[in-house]
Image (spheres, rainbow, N blue to C red):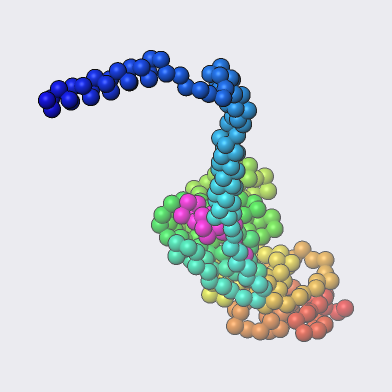
Amino acid sequence: MKQNDEHIDLSTIDQQSKTFFSGGKFHWEKSEADIWASMEDQIVDQPKGLLMSINFGLAKWVVAASIVILFSIGSFLRFYTTTIENPAGQHLEAMLPDQSKVNLNAQSSISYNPYWWKISRKVTLEGEAFFEVQKGKKFTVVSEKGTTQVMGTSFNIFAREEIYKVTCITGTVKVRSLLGYEAIIKPNSKAEINGQGGIDVLTNIETFPEISWKKNIFLFTASPIYAVFTEIERQYGVKIDTKINDESLYTGNFNKDQNVEDILEYVCPALGLKYVRKSVGEYLIIQKGE
């Protein structure tokens, strides 16, 4: 009996289900066509791609800002410059980032890019300096009249007004003029850029006169008078006004341990001149008898 009851119940349920799904009707407020049309209208009305456009625009700004920041940092590292200026009347020793040494003569200056140093060892020089370069990548010294390149060596550069000369003490030095002429010099040699932009080389020279300033000794060999007084001005930080028209040449030397008036007392008579003290640190050079 129980099995029969279970059969009857299942049959009844099955029959009701068939009736419901086959003949039953669902009552909607809108027809199927109206519902699909409404859904299509909503789809059309959606701002297609708006969210993507906003994100893409933001991404572009982020990328652009990143590029600007990276460029700014790169420019800072590349062009940030350290300048060391040595005034008249003084000598100064400076240390570069790789421990290369620079001795600056009076009234001379150097500049370089410290944060770019590992990529490019380049120094700009005005005046006169003695370099002791550590071994490593190419080391370049740039001046108005020429360029000097080395690897690891010591040398002196004089770069003032129209004169540019390089004296090699140790190692090998390459000198290049603005016109592209080049000369390679070795110890006890000197290269000087001439008036035509070429390079004159002297070998087997006595190098001490070129670097004697490091010992506070100043040597002159057939030097124009104006060059002698200019050097005295530079080394003592004084002003010397010359009221002379003389192209005489001077040969001699002086030691900076002496005071400036002692030097003038020594130099002037040899040239037929005398000096007058105008004020503290200012002198007038005139011909004797005036």
Pick the front one: 246 or 52 = 52
Looking at the rendering, which quadrant does residue 162 occupy?
Answer: bottom right
At x 57% / y 50%, what residue is drawn? 69
Q: Is residue 208 left or right of residue 236?
A: left
Pick the front one: 163 or 1 = 1
Looking at the rendering, which quadrant does residue 80 occupy?
Answer: bottom right
Pick the front one: 123 or 179 = 123
Image quadrant holding the N terminus, namely top left
Q: Is residue 76 left or right of residue 9?
A: right
Pick the front one: 260 or 47 = 47
| Residue at the far front in the pictured view | 1
Give the image location of residue 15, x and y in percent. 30, 18
Image quadrant holding the C terminus, namely bottom right
Give the image location of residue 87, x and y in percent. 66, 72
At x 38% / y 18%, what residue is drawn? 21
Task: Give the magenta-colored segment's residue range.
Answer: 109-124
77 relative to 14, above or below: below
| Residue at the far top in the pictured view | 22
Give the image location of residue 137, x and y in percent. 43, 51
At x 48% / y 63%, what residue is drawn? 97
56 relative to 285, above or below: above
Asked whether residue 272 is in view, the answer is: no
Asked if residue 122 lies in the magenta stretch, the reply is yes
At x 58% / y 19%, what residue is drawn? 34
Asked whether residue 34 is in view, the answer is: yes
Q: Is residue 273 left or right of residue 158?
A: right
| Residue at the far right in the pictured view | 290
